[in-house]
Amino acid sequence: MERDSTSRLPPSLAPEHAWSAASRLLRPALRPAGTVGVDGRNFHVPSSTGLPGKPLVLPGPAGLAIGYVIPGQGFDVLVGAEHLLAWGVGPDDVHAAAMANLAVWSVEAPWVAEVNGFRRVVWSESGEGVDAARILLPEVRAQLAADLGGIGRVLIGVPERDLLIATGLAEGDDEFAAMMAAYVIDRSNGADHPIDPRLLELEDGELVVFGGPSGAWQ
């Protein structure tokens, strides 16, 4: 039986080579603090300032890094300097396209909630590799602040690629803060794709490190 050659894209139109294809697939990915790569702030097409194979990274919230991926079947392709040179676009174009795709996905992606008295925890754990990255979206941060901030501070955890967890912290509920901090550490330590073992919080719409009353949970 002959294969249908029309069902396969020519290499020149594959996402790794064609911006028109890649721009519809790109997604941002939160990366651990200290991630080494090509600094997107200093990269300019057509000059190549990074070594081939190094991922493109931009500064993220709370000292984390933002990388970019092309999702594949069973694996993701990290976007690097060679991709930008092939596409003829800059880091700002990559970031804008990736964030737009994430926003479209996030609108339909589910949240799970658990309530125990005045304690309410919500989390995103779809397994599609971008749950933690949802915290990059201003509309997600605004919604979490509105839903959870009524009782006090809004705590955030991004322990691994596939989990974003958030809760409202009532004043004086130090026990719950310690429980959340321990949970985030455990999830990060056991993750295949860890991001951050720290407990974070939303402060004026921005993600910052939560130190707790005495800084004991950093």
Image (spheres, grey):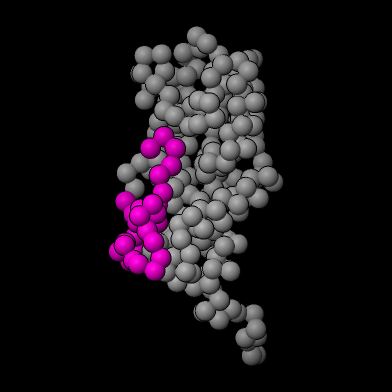
Query: Residue shown at 35%/67% (left/top)?
Result: 47
- In this image, 23 relative to 63: left or right? right
Query: Residue shown at 54%/38% (left/top)?
Result: 135
* Quadrant that contains the C terminus: top left
For residue 49, which quarter of the picture?
bottom left
Above/below status of 23 relative to 106 = below
Total numbered circles = 0
* Residue, far bottom: 2
Above/below status of 133 relative to 119 = below
Is residue 212 within the magenta segment? Answer: no
From the top left corner, tell me how far across and down residue 93 is, in percent. 51, 58
From the top left corner, tell me how far across and down residue 92 is, in percent. 49, 55
For residue 150, which quarter of the picture?
top right
From the top left corner, tell me how far across and down residue 167 is, in percent. 56, 25
Above/below status of 40 relative to 201 = below
Above/below status of 155 relative to 17 = above
* Quadrant that contains the N terminus: bottom right
For residue 101, which quarter of the picture?
bottom right
* Residue, far right: 108
Residue closer to the observer: 189 or 147: 147
Is residue 56 within the magenta segment? Answer: yes
**Residue 108 appears anywhere in the view:** yes
Range of the magenta residues?
A: 36-63
Query: Residue shown at 54%/33% (left/top)?
Result: 165
Query: Residue shown at 55%/81% (left/top)?
Result: 10
Residue closer to the observer: 195 or 179: 195
From the top left corner, tell me how far across and down residue 171 is, in percent. 52, 11
* Residue, far top: 172
**Residue 55 appears anywhere in the view:** no
